[in-house]
Image (spheres, helix red, strand yellow):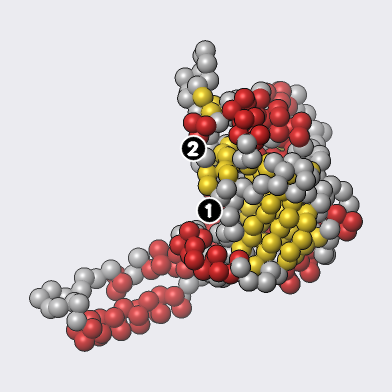
């Protein structure tokens, strides 16, 4: 199912910004940082996480690295300082030790709870909805910083960020990039001196975030934050955008099918001599241009769809509830396609992340109906007898494609 990044729904995105979704998409996304005060938003973020949730995650959920880390004075702490063995029945040596976390927090370290879009139910749901709104993969971390402390030095991220202040206050300074739209292999550590110099200049944004305030930072934006008079909790929503570089990689991979771009360079000559190499480079460029000119949007879209499938988790599915729903299915049971599934339909085949579900050819039209409507019942499916409708719906429930509406 394709998302609607233009924001026909957009409820999750509207929790993060007060601008109309279309305005944010056209004027802010990937272009400029944006501060939004809580007064302009409908509600705060206490329903997503809070102090009690942090305590529960650290003390009773048995988290292991890399689902948490700690940092102090701009340096990540060795995991042995806040983890230990899991005890009887747990053959692991990197499970969170709540007493050690307590000691490090008391000493001024920042706690980072990573990948909460995988471990904490309210954030799992929020992140899945936001990924649908944006059309790009999303991850969520929580940062817990003691009063008057800074966890990380000025730096930039290679993904876009929404900062959602949950509790306490934190002072943020935002500076222009030194690398515009950095890619995954262009981290800030490669530009430490330039980042430090830029951070010493006048800030684009220099403000305190209060509970309910938000920041949006395009990738590459330099930022640093320091907790003020109380413990600060904020969520960092990382958005990993699909970029034109993804298209470039697809085009170069597709170009491997062209024999003219696979042929060997000549032997017996000095290929390090620019004059010798020049005509072969010119021929290669000409062949590449010809190949690129024949690129088809359909194949490029399929390549991006496959990449998005790998990076985006659909909304959770409950195995026992699904089996019970399949057993209780009737022709009038309301069903819908699982949100965020990003399945690709090819006739009578449903291409999922790690497998293909094949149904009978007579069910191809029924698949179109299922994936085109928000909800329907087995009785609404065309081209099949009642028994076939129930068989198809039951199969897709058990495959995690359909869920009760």
Give the number of marks. Answer: 2
Residue 222 vs residue 61, the one in the foreground? 222
**Element at label 1:** helix
| Tag 1 residue | 306
Q: Position of residue 306 (x, y in %)?
A: 53, 53
**Element at label 2:** loop
CA separation in Å, label 1 and label 2: 36 Å
| Tag 2 residue | 78
Q: Is residue 25 above or below residue 288?
A: above
Q: Position of residue 47 (x, y in %)?
A: 81, 39
Residue 111 vs residue 340, the one in the foreground? 111
Residue 337 vs residue 55, the one in the foreground? 55
Q: Residue at x 69, y 69 (%)?
A: 203
Asked whether the residues under the numbered discs 1 and 2 touch, taking CB atoms below 8 Å apart as contact, a structural biologist would say no
Q: Is residue 268 above or below residue 377?
A: below
Mark 1 vs mark 2: which is more N-terminal? 2
Q: Where is residue 216, by image quadrant?
A: bottom right
Lateral position of residue 105 relative to residue 196, left or right: right
Q: Residue at x 81, y 60 (%)?
A: 36
The answer to whether any part of residue 298 appears in the image is: no
Q: Where is residue 221, by image quadrant?
A: bottom right
Query: Is the residue marked by circle 1 packed among few (<14), some (14-19), or many (20+) residues within 10 Å?
Result: some
């Amino acid at each position: 199912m394709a998302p609607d990044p233009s924001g026909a729904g957009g409820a999750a995105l509207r929790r993060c910004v007060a601008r109309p979704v279309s305005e944010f998409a056209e004027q802010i996304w990937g272009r400029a940082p944006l501060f939004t005060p809580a007064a302009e938003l409908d509600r705060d973020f206490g329903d997503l996480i809070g102090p009690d949730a942090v305590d529960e995650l650290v003390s009773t959920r048995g988290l292991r690295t890399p689902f948490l880390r700690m940092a102090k004075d701009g340096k990540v702490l060795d995991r042995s300082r806040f983890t230990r063995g899991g005890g009887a029945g747990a053959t692991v040596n990197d499970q969170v030790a709540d007493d050690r976390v307590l000691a490090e927090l008391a000493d001024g370290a920042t706690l980072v709870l990573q990948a909460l879009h995988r471990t904490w139910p309210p954030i799992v749901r929020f992140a899945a909805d936001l990924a649908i709104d944006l059309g790009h993969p999303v991850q969520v971390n929580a940062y817990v910083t003691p009063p008057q402390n800074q966890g990380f030095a000025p730096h930039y991220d290679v993904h876009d960020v929404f900062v959602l202040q949950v509790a306490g206050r934190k002072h943020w300074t935002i500076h222009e990039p030194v690398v515009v739209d950095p890619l995954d292999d262009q981290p800030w550590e490669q530009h430490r001196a330039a980042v430090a110099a830029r951070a010493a200049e006048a800030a684009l944004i220099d403000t305190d975030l209060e509970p309910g305030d938000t920041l949006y930072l395009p990738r590459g934006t330099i930022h640093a934050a320091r907790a003020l008079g109380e413990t600060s909790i904020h969520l960092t929503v990382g958005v990993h955008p699909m970029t034109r570089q993804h298209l470039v990689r697809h085009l170069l991979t597709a170009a491997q099918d062209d024999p003219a771009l696979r042929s060997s360079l000549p032997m017996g000559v000095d290929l390090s001599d620019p004059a010798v190499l020049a005509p072969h480079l010119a021929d290669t460029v000409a062949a590449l241009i010809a190949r690129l000119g024949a690129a088809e949007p359909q194949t490029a879209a399929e390549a991006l769809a496959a990449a998005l499938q790998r990076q985006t988790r659909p909304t959770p599915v409950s195995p026992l509830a699904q089996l019970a729903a399949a057993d209780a299915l009737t022709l009038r049971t309301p069903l819908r396609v699982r949100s965020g599934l990003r399945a690709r339909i090819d006739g009578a085949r449903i291409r999922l992340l790690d497998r293909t579900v094949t149904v009978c050819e007579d069910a191809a039209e029924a698949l179109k109906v299922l994936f085109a409507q928000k909800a329907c019942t087995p009785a609404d499916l065309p081209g099949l007898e009642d028994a076939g409708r129930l068989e198809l719906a039951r199969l897709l429930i058990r495959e995690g494609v359909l869920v009760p509406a």
